[in-house]
Amino acid sequence: MGVIVFDSKRSIVFSNKRADLFLKRYKLPNEIKTICRRIFDAISVSKREELFPGEIHIHKKLEGSQSTWSFRFGIREQPKPFVSVFITEESDSHKLDMNMIRNQFHLTRRETDVLGRVLNGLKNSEISDDLDISEQTVKDYLSNIYAKLKVENRFTLASLLFNSPEFKHS
């Protein structure tokens, strides 16, 4: 999960590694800063609870991504006001039963981590950054995955898994 924290000037004062990867790949939706501004405005006039009584969620498809992204807001008023935005990806791999795939093809946990990211459309360099491993290690894991699933490339890998009803969540 990515986390970005904004201060009352709507500047990013913290972002974790996953959020940094997200920001490297995609543009933060305009609605995020707009909602942050409105939250800070409400806090400044002591109406935050009245204007934002419940949880705030945005679900959005982003340009260049096949996934739907979820943005959930957390608000802290004391001692200093800040807004946290929690970013999660509702990705294609979540539609598959990765444990079943792992067990059926005797994948290691790390191979399963790499497989999920491949199915979500990440490049080797992005997988490397995300898992904090070298690109060569990603390639090695991919070779093992291809051999175990008896496929030759990403396309046939994805076709095999997404077109097999046995691997889909019901």
Image: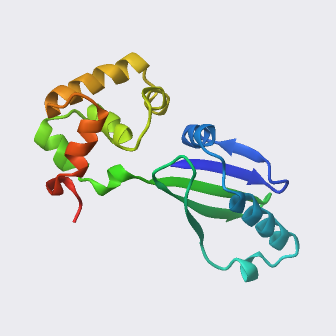
- Quadrant for the C terminus, please: bottom left
Name the residue rendered at 35%, 19% in the picture: 137
Give x and y (percent) for residue 104: 11, 42
> Is residue 77 found left or right of 9 in the rendered image?
left
Write the residue at 58% across / 66% down.
58
In the displayed structure, would residue 111 be above or below residue 58? above
- Above or below residue 123? Residue 137 is above
Q: Is residue 92 above or below residue 170?
A: above
Give the percent coordinates (x, y) of residue 153: 27, 30
What colour scheme governs how the chains and residues are painted in the rendered image of this protein?
A: rainbow
Q: Residue at x 57, y 43 (%)?
A: 22
The answer to whether residue 77 shows anywhere in this view is no
Query: Considering depth in this image, is 98 or 30 the residue closer to the camera?
Result: 30
In the image: residue 53, left or right of residue 96:
right
Residue at 14 percent of width and 35 percent of height: 106
**Furthest residue in direction right, as rendered:** 45
- In this rendering, the answer to whether 7 lies above or below 19 is below
Q: Position of residue 80 (x, y in %)?
A: 80, 57
Residue 41: give x, y in percent of width and height: 84, 69
Residue farthest to the bottom, as pictured: 50
Q: Residue furthest left?
A: 104
Residue 74 is at least partly visible in this image: yes
Q: Residue furthest top?
A: 136
- Please tell me how many numbered marks the rendered image carries: 0
Residue 102, image quadrant? top left
